[in-house]
Image (cartoon, helix red, strand yellow):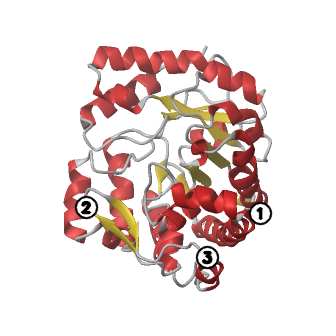
Amino acid sequence: MTSLLKNDLLLRALLCEPTPRRPIWLMRQAGRYLPEYRATRAKAGSFMALCTNPDLACEVTLQPIDRFPLDAAILFSDILTIPHAMDVGLEFEAGEGPKIARPVRSAADIDKLKIPDPGHELRYVIDAVALIRRELDGRVPLIGFAGSPWTVGTYMVEGGGSKTFGHIKRMMYESPALLHRLLGVLVRCTIAYLNAQIAAGAQAVMLFDTWGGVLTPAQYEEFSLRYMQQVIEALTRDADGRRVPRIVFTKGGGAWLAKIAAIGCDAVGVDWTTDLKTARAAVGGRVALQGNLDPSALFAPPDTLRSETLRVLESYGEGPGHVFNLGHGITPDVDPQRVAVLVETVRNYVIG
């Protein structure tokens, strides 16, 4: 599609192929902790204006790549682009996060949902992917992503973020068939959306299951995992003559790593509450692992940050199949110099 990939460490590690060092990228590596991001965000005028402008989305995607020697870029977008395109009245309120004006809580609400075409309603994302891929010029791979059906559905039913998840859990217990119907719609949308990102140039894709960890084990399998498996199984497997790795990350899903590894993904994200040695034993070499430094470690003095980073690297042990990342996203109040220390430490680590 474009120039030869100069750094393919991420793609190799995600497929458990040997690499000379551990690749590193960071969730929310393009974001508010960077002054250049804040300047671009101010220029855009609003978060959604930034997301929906391919030129500006490309600009902020490349900012951390220009600043740090990271091994991947991740598309700057949001997990709620699908509901935004479904015309449920999504807005982002300063300091309060996403708000949905027309929550989806009945069969009639589901019937009214507009099924977005990635080439039309979500064209701005697909155009951003193609532009970023071109501007990267083979420096590092580009990761595309989407929210998991359960997580996206949670926002749609709740009408925004939630501490108790009362609306969607009530639906789950009172009207499980209705919830399954909504999740089925979201599966179809997510498959089309991610395959369009791959066609436009994404070289790996990731499902973010932010709220899977609020479920019981049985509920997780029924309402989250089964739908992620349907997405994973339907994704384009090859592009540009090589495999397109598929990553699944459930925040709070440490107890279910073996089940996640069994759905056909290539890599499983691990949050900071599970030791990588334990995670590696759970998945039994079936998949690569991604993670899992506590994001708050970026507040530590440099020496402490280095020691915590080494602890994560050493907890994985020898052999291929590890992509270094945080256990969740960078918070806005992190000093970029701490990120520089982290990246340098990982890049200098000698694989045993």
> Is 255 on the left-hand or right-hand side of 95?
right
Q: For this rendering, which residue is in front, 194 or 200?
A: 194
Which residue is label 3 attached to? Answer: 106
Dot 1 amino acid type: Ala
- What is the spatial separation of the Cα atoms under label 2 and label 3, in whole angstroms? 29 Å
Mark 1 and mark 2 lie on one chain; the one further toward the N terminus is 2
Q: Are marks 1 and 2 in contact (CB under 8 Å)?
A: no
- Residue at 47% from the left image edge and 74% from the top image edge: 84
Q: CA distance from mark 3 to mark 1?
A: 28 Å
Q: Which residue is mark 1?
A: 234
User: Which element type, helix, strand or loop, lies under badge 1?
Assistant: helix
Contact check, label 2 and label 3, Cβ < 8 Å = no
Q: Nearer the viewer, mark 1 or mark 2?
A: 2
Q: Secondary structure at mark 3?
A: loop
Label ID, residue 94: 2
Dot 2 lies on which element? Answer: loop
Name the residue type under label 2.
Ala
Is 153 on the left-hand or right-hand side of 237? left
Q: Amino acid at mark 3?
A: Ser
At horizontal 77% and vertical 59% (from top left) the residue drawn is 230
Quadrant where the C terminus is found in the figure? top right
For label 3, the crowd category at 10 Å Cα-Cα, with few meaning under 14, some 14 to 19 and many 20 or more, is: some
Residue 311: mark: none
Q: Relative to 238, does residue 108 appear above or below in the rendering?
A: below
| Residue displayed at 66% across by 26% down | 279
